[in-house]
Each structure stands twice: as C-alpha cells, then as structure tokens.
Amino acid sequence: MEQYRRWYIGILLASVLCAACIVATNYFINPYEIYKVPSIVGINDRKLYSNPYLWKARRISEAKEDALFLGSSRTGRGLDPEHYFAISEQTAFNAGLSGATFKEQQAYLEYAIQSNPQLKEVFLGLDFEGFNEYSQAIPAFKESRLATTRLTNSDRLETLFTQTALLDSLRVVRASAVSSSAGGDLILSDGSNDEQFLID
Amino acid sequence: MTLGRFLYRYVYLPTNKSLLNRVFVPLGLRKYVKLRTSISLLLLFIVSGIWHGAGWTFIVFGLLNGLAMVAHRLWKKRGFKLRATNFADALKVLKGMFGMNGIILPVRLEDRLSYLPAGTWLKFSDFTMIDVHHALLYLLASFIIILCFKNSVQLLNNFKPKFIHLLFSFILLMYALLNLTKVSEFLYFNF
C-alpha cells in the first residue's frame, strides 16, 4: 500500500508543480501582452500579436485613449495614431481588426463606450467588405469577452493554461533572444502596423 | 450466465476491489464507508462526464451530476423521500437509444432507394462523419489493440506502480489538460 501512496503523492505533486510552472511561464512571458508584466529586452520583448480580437479589447479598456480607429485590417494598416497625435494632440488607439464587418466593429464600439468614459472621437474605416452580411463568423470574435471590462475566465484559461499559449511563450522567448519578429504582422503597441516592417 | 451477473463479476467486483485497495486504503479511508461511497459516486460521474466529450463543460457537468447524486444519497439516508423521477424524459432517452427518432441514410443512396417512403421516420442526409478514411484506420487499430493485447482488468492483476507508469500517466494528464480548452466539443444531435 505504501507503494501506491507514494505513487499518488508523486503524480499529484508532479502535476500541480508542472501546472503552476506552465501558468507562471505564460504569465511572465506574457506572449499576447495582456497582463501587466514588464517586458525585458532579450527575454520577452518580442510579443506575438496573433489574436488581435483579444489583446485590442484589453488595450481599449485599459489604455483609455482620447480617440479610437475602428475598421478592418485596412484601418490597421492605414491609420497612424502617432500622426493623429501630432496633428490633434489627442492620443489614439488603432482597433482595426482583420476580417471585421460592421457587426464586430459595432460590438467593439459599444465596448469602448462602456469601458472608456474619456473617449472623445471615433473614426470608422468604411470598407466594402464591411457590408457583407454573408461573411462567415470569425472564431476569434467572442461576445462574452466584450460583456465585461475585466478579463474573462475563458480568456485567462486560454492564455495561461493551454498548449497553444505555452508554445507561443516559447516562440516569444526564442524571437526575443535573437531580436526577430515573433510571427505575424509586426504590430505596434498603438494597434497600427509597423510601416518599416511593411516596407521591408 | 446473465448479463447482470457477468457485469457484477467481471466489472463491478474487480473495479470495486481495486478502488478499495489502490485508492481508499492508501489514502487512509478504509473505515469511512459513507465517505468512500460518496467519493466513488463523484468519480463515476466525473468519468462519465469526460466520456461525453473532451471539454471543461463536460467535466463540470459530470461533477454536478455526481454532487447531485451524493446530495440525494445523504438526503435519503436522513429519511426524506423524493417523488419518482419524470417518465417523459426517460422515455425520450430510450427512444433515442433505439433509433425511434428516425433513421438517416446517406444522400448517395437516395436515387436507388427512392421507393422508400421518406418522411419523419426516414431521411436522406449527408454523413455526419467527415473523415471516413481516418475513422476506418482508427477502428482497425482499435480492433488490433482490443483483440491482440491484454485488457485493463488483465493488466490490473500484475500491476505494480512503477516510476515509468507515473511518468506515462503524468505526460498524458498534462497533455490532456493543456488541450482541453482547444478541443471542440461534440453533442448528440438526436437526443
């Protein structure tokens, strides 16, 4: 019986420790930049912007900018918050989401109004495909995420304790170590695409 | 031997004995019979929850059912009695099990079997399984494993908890947990 007791304690301890390590790794490496953890150059400074529907929602509710750019990826590539600040002295965030139709944009607009009382202006990027009512549902778009200004439990689980998150953390560490892009389009922290990256 | 006796002898007794010797005695629960029964019930329902589909919702579903069963047992032990359960629901499940909700045949056969009266009892529709080729391969592999190797009850007779088993179980457990949120859930569409 002693053998079995040791076996149980062994597997319980190993699982709990391993799970804690995975959660801690994903939290501190913070591959999608949604937790308030410092970015250290060479370790976790190259983030992965593979899920803009998640991290842009988090940024909208936390950064509380004066202006918001909504639209599809055309908005993401075309409008520059830095330039907007230079001409208007108002801070802005580019919330362009690839593949978003007006249905998704409306949800993000309502979310921004609800979570950011300082919001003064919203720019809507008109887009022919935005009117396509037959476009397929986007799996990354979740209405439950926009129902609250806090991080939802399912997002917390998805970003801390899944195989995808763990592999993405490793990818971020590897990209940071050699100062390369972690993957996908290189997106700036203001939500717009990096022009230099587009030219390269 | 009837099916009931077969199940009792080859499934219930070994499981019960191994659960006692391998789980409850090492955990020091030998004397706590009521607690043991409750834990067994809970485990049973969690396992059947996972059997329904790989997803957190199914685990919670199993857990809730198990908790309800435990509560029901404790309630009954105290001398309270509950009204008989709903018959309509039981009938619905039984109908589903025996295919009384109708039969669905592949669309390919519609031309050849057009003389059959299609209606509520018989439908022609697309096959719900998408990857038939791989499914057949998995079936073949499963048959080989089932027919050519020892089953879990036979393995249990000579089982000794070794480090290699611990490592194997640990890797499987972590892999399964890390993939729980990603795996798509399935539901019975006929129930």
Image: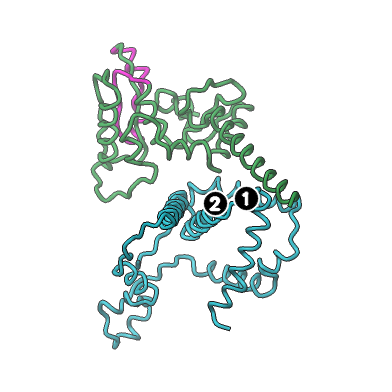
Please tell me whether mark 2 sits on a helix, a strand or a loop.
helix
Q: Which chain is cyan?
A: B
User: Is A64 on the left or on the right of B35, as rendered?
Assistant: left
Q: What residue type is labelled 2?
A: Leu
Residue B120, x across and y down, in percent: 26, 77
Residue A105, x across and y down, in percent: 28, 36
**Quadrant in the rendering for residue B105:** bottom left
* In the image, residue A195 lies in the stretch drawn in magenta: no
- Which of these two is toward me, A80 or B106? B106
Callout 1 touching callout 2 (CB < 8 Å): yes
Q: Which chain is green?
A: A
Residue B144, x across and y down, in percent: 65, 73
In the displayed structure, B95 sits above or below A139; it is below
The chain under label 2 reads B
The chain under label 1 reads B
Q: Is residue A199 visible?
A: no
Q: Earlier in the sequence, mark 1 or mark 2?
A: 1
Pointer 2 residue:
B35
Give the residue drawn at x 62%, y 50%: B29
Pointer 1 residue:
B29
